[in-house]
Image: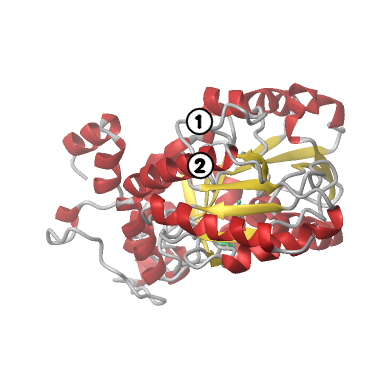
Amino acid sequence: MSAGKKDILDTAGINTRLGHLGHDPHAFHGFVNPPVVHASTVLFPSAEEMRAPPERQQKYTYGTHGTPTTDALCEAIDALEGSAGTVLVPSGLTAVTLPFLAYLSAGDHALIVDSVYFPTRRFCATMLKRLGVDVDYFDPGIGAEIETLIKPNTRLIHLEAPGSNTFEMQDVPAIVTVAHRHDCIVTIDNTWATPLYFRPLDFGVDVSIHAATKYPSGHSDVLMGTVSANAKHWPALTAAYTNLGLCVGPDDAYQILRGLRTMAIRLEHHQRSALHVAKWLEGRSDVASVLHPALPSFPGHALWKRDFKGASGVFSFVLNVDDATQFEEKAAAFLNALKLFGLGYSWGGYESLAVPVQLGDRRVCKQPKEGPVIRLQIGLEDVEDIIADLERGFAAVAAAGG
Ligand SMILES: *Cc1c(COP(=O)(O)O)cnc(C)c1O
C-alpha cells in the first residue's frame, strides 16, 4: 500500500478503514479484492534461494506458512487490533486453545474467568490437565484482588469480557496491572465486542482472540479464529502455530475479509436493535432481569461504559418463573413459539437466534434463582418484527403449565 494511503487510513473513520485495510489493489493488477490463492507448493527460482536463511528467502515458501490471501486478512486484523502479528486458525475454539499451548508448560498454573465460553473450560479440564497445567477459575468481578489467587507458577490469565451467556464485565486494566507485576501473560476472548468496540491491546492485554466465525463472517457460513499478539508475545505464538501445522483455507480467509468490509455497518444495526429489544424486555413483568452491559441497570455497566466503544447484538434475559421446577418447561414454551428466531448456537450472522442457557459448569456465576436464562442474538431483521416474534414466546409462556 502506498505510504500516503496508509497514513490516511491510520486516522480515518472505521468504515473507511474497514473498506480499505488489508489489500492494496494496485499490488495485484488493480483488482479491488485480493486474489484467492490455492497453494500447497511454492516454487523457488534456484537451489541457492531454497537454502537461504528464512529472513533472506522469498516471501512465500510453503502453503501452510501464508499466502497473499491470508496475509491480506492478517494485515487487516493487525491494523484493527494494533497487534504485532495475527495468526488464522480453523475455529474460534482453536484461537482460544492455541495461546494456552503456546505459553503454558507442565507445572504451570493459569487463572481463567468463571464466565468463560464452555468449550474453553472443557479444554482446560481435559487436555491442559493431561499436559500438567493447573487451572483455577475466578469471579469476573474480582478486579485487582486477583493478586490473592496468583501463585509462584501462575503464567497466564485468561479473560472474556463480557462473559459468555451471562455477560459479566471484567476490570481489564486492573487485572492486567496485577498480572504484569507477576510476569503473567494476559489473553482475552474478545469475540463479543470485536476490535471495533474494544481494543484489548490498548488496555495492556497481551493477546486478543476472536471467533471470526461470528461478526467478521457475519453470514453463519464460515468458521475461523484469529489470534493477535503484541510484539513481546508474538514470537512464541507464531512458533506454536508453525509447530502445530495450523492453517486455514484461502476461500475462508477471503470470506472473512469480505465480511469485515461491512462489519461496522452491521454491528451498528445489531447494537441499535439489541438495545431497543433489551429495554423493551426490561419493562416487562414476565422478565426478571436483562443481562446486557449497555443497560444502566446491569452490574458491569460502569466498566463497559469506561472501556468499550459499543455493544454488539448478543445478550440474555432471565424469564420470571416463580416455581423452579417449571424453569425448563417455561423456557421450552418460549423458544418453541418463536417463528422468526432460529434455535441455534453460533451467533454473529444476520439472523436472530435464541438458545436456552445452561450454567451447570459455573463455579461462581451460577444459575439465577428468578428463572431460566435465555440468550438472544438480535439479527438484522426489522426490530418491530423481532419484537412481535418475542411476544409470541411470552404468550406461550403465559399459556404453559400452572
Ligand atoms: C463462538 C465462540 C467461540 C468459538 O468459535 P467457533 O468458531 O465456533 O469455534 C469462542 N469464544 C466465544 C466467546 C464464542 O462466542
Name the residue carrying label 1.
Answer: 308
Colour pattern: secondary structure
323 vs 168, left or right, is right
Precedes in sequence: disc 2 or disc 1: 2
**Mark 1 Cα-neighbour bin, 10 Å: few <14, some 14–19, many ≥20:** some
Q: Nearer the viewer, residue 49 or 352?
A: 352
Ligand 1 within 8 angstroms of badge 1 C-beta: no
Q: Position of residue 247 (x, y in %)?
A: 50, 66
Q: Amino acid at mark 1?
A: Phe
Compared with 138, 35 (above or below) is below
> Which residue corresponds to the image point at 32% horizontal and 61% vertical from the top-left?
68
223 vs 333, left or right, is left
**Disc 2/disc 1 C-alpha distance (Å):** 8 Å
Q: Nearer the viewer, residue 240 or 306?
A: 306
Query: In the rendered image, which quarter contains the N terminus?
Result: top left
> Which residue corresponds to the image point at 87% horizontal and 33% vertical from the top-left?
151
> Which residue corresponds to the image point at 71% horizontal and 64% vertical from the top-left?
400
Would you say the residues marked 2 and 1 are in contact, meaning their CB atoms lie under 8 Å apart? yes
> Which residue corresponds to the image point at 62% horizontal and 47% vertical from the top-left?
316
Name the residue carrying label 2.
Answer: 193
Image quarter for residue 113? Answer: top right
Visible in this render: residue 288?
A: yes
Q: Nearer the viewer, residue 331 or 303?
A: 331
Q: Residue furthest left?
A: 30
Q: Position of residue 71 (x, y in %)?
A: 37, 56
Q: Amino acid at mark 2?
A: Ala
Element assignment for label 1? loop
Query: In the rendered image, which quarter contains the C terminus?
Result: bottom right
